[in-house]
Amino acid sequence: MKQRMKQLLAVPLVALVATACSGNVDVDPGPQPEEGVVTVQVENNVAPPTVITAEAHQARSNVRTTLGSVAPMETDAFMYNPQGLRTGEFHLVATATDGTEYRSNPFTLVDAEVVEWDLATNTVTVTAMN
């Protein structure tokens, strides 16, 4: 019985080692942004520390899109699709668990690839596509 168990365990182990050594292991690079999608990074560094829920707002159409939650003293990135409406002004809103609302200054998304928002300083940095 012990000999049979050793044989059963040895076969998968040999296959695993052979696969690992072959160099043909596919690595998943993770999700890739879609065409027109903007990465929004929110740095939740407000005092006192609190969980926030971030939203993106399109001023012209008044469309609000929830991006997600960010833990205290953390930075999270979200994929935001402005639905083809890259012209006009946008702003970000963060709502704390106690109801306190933080609102960014307006910015545009023309040619934008990444938007970074530092909540403590209310600084928005927009990085254009290359």
Image (cartoon, grey):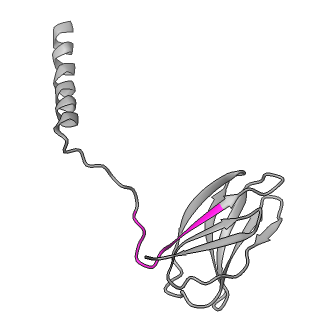
- Residue 71 lies left or right of residue 99; in this view the side is left
**Could you tell me residue 30's position as x and y percent?**
39, 56
> Is residue 93 at all visible to an observer of this figure?
yes
Residue at x 17%, y 26% (from the top left corner) = 14
**Image x and y of residue 60, in percent:** 65, 92
Q: How many marks?
A: 0
* Residue at the farthest top position: 2
- Would residue 80 appear left or right of 17 to someone viewing this image? right
Residue 1 in the image, given as x and y percentages of width and height: 19, 8
Q: Which residue is outermost to the front?
A: 130
Q: Quadrant of residue 107?
A: bottom right
Position of residue 91 relative to residue 44, above or below, is: below
Front-lying residue, 106 or 98: 106
Q: Is residue 73 magenta?
A: no
Residue at point 23% right, 44% down?
25
Q: Position of residue 118 (x, y in %)?
A: 70, 64
Q: Nearer the viewer, residue 84 or 24?
A: 24
Q: Can residue 1 be seen in the rendering of this structure?
A: no
Task: Determine the residue positioned at 43% across, 76% down.
Answer: 130
In this picture, which residue range is highlighted in magenta? 32-42
31 left or right, relative to 13: right
23 w.r.t. 33: above or below: above
Query: Looking at the image, which is closer to me, 119 or 52?
Result: 119
